[in-house]
Amino acid sequence: METFRNVCPRNCYGTCGIISHVENGMLTKVTGDPKHGFSRGRLCAKGYAYTQFVYNSYRLKYPIIQSPRGSGNWKRISWDDAYNIIAEKILELNDRYGSNLALSYSKFSGNIGLLHFATEGMFNSFGPHTKPFGNLCMGTGEMAIKTSFGKMASPVPEDMAEAKLIVIWGANPAVTNIHQMKFIYAARKKGAKIVVIDPVFTETALKADLYIQIKPGSDAYLSFGIAKLLLEKKTPEHHPEHLNGWEEYKNFLQNNVDMDQICQKTGVKYEYIEKLAELYHNCKPAATWSGFGIQRNKYGGESVEALNSLAALSGNINVVKGGGVYFAHGDIYDFPLNLANFPEKKHPSISQSRLINISNFAAAIRELKEPPVKFLWIASRSPLSQDQNFKAWEELFQEMELIVTVDLYMTNAAKMSDIILPAASHFEEEDLNVGYWHHWLAINEKAIPPYFEAKSDLQIARELTKRLNELSPGFSDFPYDLEPIDWIKKELTPEIKKIYGISSYKDLLDGPRHRKQIETVCEEAFSFHIPKKWNPDAQDKKPYPYRLLSPQSLLKIHSQFSNISWLHPELEETVAEISKKTAEEKDIKDGMKVRIFNGHGTVTATAKINAFLPEDVILVRQTAKNTINRLITTRLHDENNPESTYFYDSFVDISKKEGH
Ligand SMILES: Nc1nc2c(c(=O)[nH]1)N[C@H]1C(S)=C(S)[C@@H](COP(=O)(O)OP(=O)(O)OC[C@H]3O[C@@H](n4cnc5c(=O)[nH]c(N)nc54)[C@H](O)[C@@H]3O)O[C@H]1N2
Ligand SMILES: Nc1nc2c(c(=O)[nH]1)N[C@H]1C(S)=C(S)[C@@H](COP(=O)(O)OP(=O)(O)OC[C@H]3O[C@@H](n4cnc5c(=O)[nH]c(N)nc54)[C@H](O)[C@@H]3O)O[C@H]1N2
Ligand code: SF4
Ligand SMILES: [Mo]
């Protein structure tokens, strides 16, 4: 039996260290890496199910092609044939339009290892193309953190154990970040108070000392209310006059913030706001956790900025271990990211790629002319379960001349592709991983041979660019001779080695390494911001009566893991949680089949009455198949802004299904 070090590369707070146990080339067991200081030898249930994720009858084994598109009439082809068909189409489009602007890709977070930027690197090596930008998950919060602090930084999450107050705004770590719970419990053991602010009474709320049910999108109001009460206490420490923007912020709190309006806007009783102000006043250090949930609506940026200001006013800007604003950090940007930043090949007349906002990808691509996009590559992405605006996607698919999906499993989008290439799992390839929550760097070793004919995204990029160059010399300047380990070494520059205290990648084979110098925020660079448009009297227009909240679920990462029978022994059904009042008004009983609908379509679900749910909220967890995202279409404020998608700003109606 041999063991290897792996890293869970899912888009998850954990980025856990894994020890894989291998016998005769087979992965027989996975355990947590005890040397990983955040996950500390543990995985979540999904992590422990990795053997079934790797060896699974639903996993894609060979390149396949279907004709006609969407028919399900799949045929196995060789890698050689797949590369030829793809390369010929790329070259033909280049001939037709005189550039590669007709080529685009949709890639997001299936595997967030550094070598998975091979897709971006491959497209850059073609020269100007049509390129997504932004981050549909945390773009809004990232911008807000940078606005307040001048940079992205987030404290060491293990230090949360030292906080005396932990206020979790719109995160549900008992589901989405289970390892963090041990640091939260450790803090509580030492006397810390835990507060959860969420419209939904979540699994995390259940563990809290104080749960505050807030109206979605109103976190900025609540934090201004708390700040106003702190200001009125007149303790000198709550008058940080030395911080940028203080006077304006103070005047705003004094003159524009009305506590009755705050209670009305947030749905939170005055006594609870007072209680929160007391806690922020008395307990230091205080950890303010800006969850990703608060920034999935159009007030998200303002909410995150307002929480940053509250942390500053309460004297909690990262000065004491355990305190500060927790959101996510940008450690990854310290790496050269040689694949993501692979220089774009020069084109004689086109200076750069066309940029498309990932939060409006399908609709924006469809509007492009001269040339239109005709070739789509989908990798690490499940748009027809995770994105919004399905109608635009479905129309986009019609307009493409070739769609290639690289994935481990048959996703909804893969079903609409012409060619599917089977992707390797992280046990079958090398990689280098940094997370966005904790500050550990880890190497991912190749532990087992690829499953049937699966290949890593990097291997595919190497082989396809090579084929392109054979057919059209000089088409791509991708260095296809470089092996994965070469790319790993290239990431470990002298500065990176210093930051992590290593001398070579080999040190990582002994265990993950923690960053030596943690990027911190400082008071000098901080500035208070007040909302640009402040109009508490304004009423939000609701095109349909219920707000649809569709957060993450425990036993999946977005659309992934739904085929793992250890986790999902039965076919996943879509469950719509509704309030008692909604149930009465619509004459819906527990377990009944219901229709949830809006102008974008209808999704059927099974009703579940949730006695704690706000009356105007319907809660549906994401499912891979009968996906609720069909009902989600949100607008961007501004095409050029890398804001997240406002998944939680969608409105629906509900009725019982005929026959009930
Ligand atoms: N098990 C599991 N873990 C995951 C994932 C997964 O799919 N499954 N996904 C990973 C990824 S990519 C991400 S981005 C993270 C996300 O994980 P979290 O940061 O926990 O974010 P969400 O699950 O989107 O939402 C958290 C909570 O925000 C609440 N919420 C919604 N709107 C508001 C609001 O306006 N104000 C407040 N205060 N609360 C609100 C929701 O009810 C929800 O309970 O989880 C990661 N971890
Ligand atoms: N309604 C609603 N929708 C949401 C959200 C929400 O809260 N509510 N959350 C949003 C958020 S926070 C996020 S992060 C996005 C996630 O959106 P996606 O990144 O599209 O999510 P996944 O479902 O994880 O899909 C990733 C795909 O990559 C594949 N994959 C895994 N590893 C590899 C690999 O090595 N190579 C290749 N080529 N493919 C691989 C997986 O099998 C899977 O099909 O979803 C968003 N969508
Ligand atoms: S899904 Fe998240 S918590 Fe589970 S093993 Fe992977 S990184 Fe760790
Ligand atoms: Mo995400």
Image: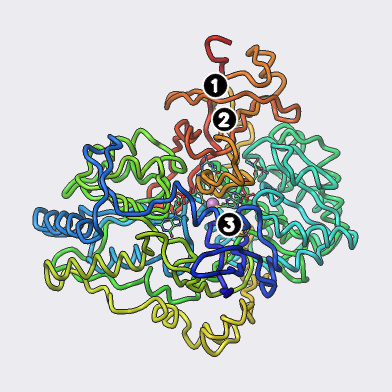
Q: Which residue is mark 1?
A: 653
Determine the residue positioned at 78% across, 71% down.
320
Residue 180 badge: none
**Residue 615 versus residue 607: which sits nearer the camera?**
607
Determine the residue positioned at 28% across, 66% down.
124
Single out the mark in the foreground, 3 or 2: 3
* Whether label 3 touches label 2, CB < 8 Å: no
Asked if 549 appears above or below 603 in the picture, the reply is: below
| SS for dot 3 | loop
Q: Residue 143 at what x, y percent from top left? A: 52, 57
Q: Which residue is mark 3?
A: 12
Q: Amino acid at mark 3?
A: Cys
Find out if the beta carbon at label 3 lies less than 8 Å from the nearest ligand 3 atom.
yes
Q: CA distance from mark 3 to mark 2?
A: 32 Å
Q: Quadrant of the N terminus?
A: bottom right
Q: Is residue 442 left or right of residue 383?
A: right
**Residue 447 versus residue 135: which sits nearer the camera?**
447
Single out the mark in the foreground, 1 or 2: 1
Q: Is residue 289 left or right of residue 211?
A: left
Asked if 149 appears above or below 483 in the picture, the reply is: above
Q: Residue 450 at what x, y percent from top left? A: 41, 64
Q: Amino acid at mark 1?
A: Asp
Q: Residue 146 at what x, y percent from top left? A: 55, 62
Q: Which residue is mark 2?
A: 540
Q: How many marks?
A: 3
Q: Residue 393 at what x, y percent from top left? A: 34, 39
Task: Compare marks 1 and 3 and give the one earlier in the sequence.
Answer: 3
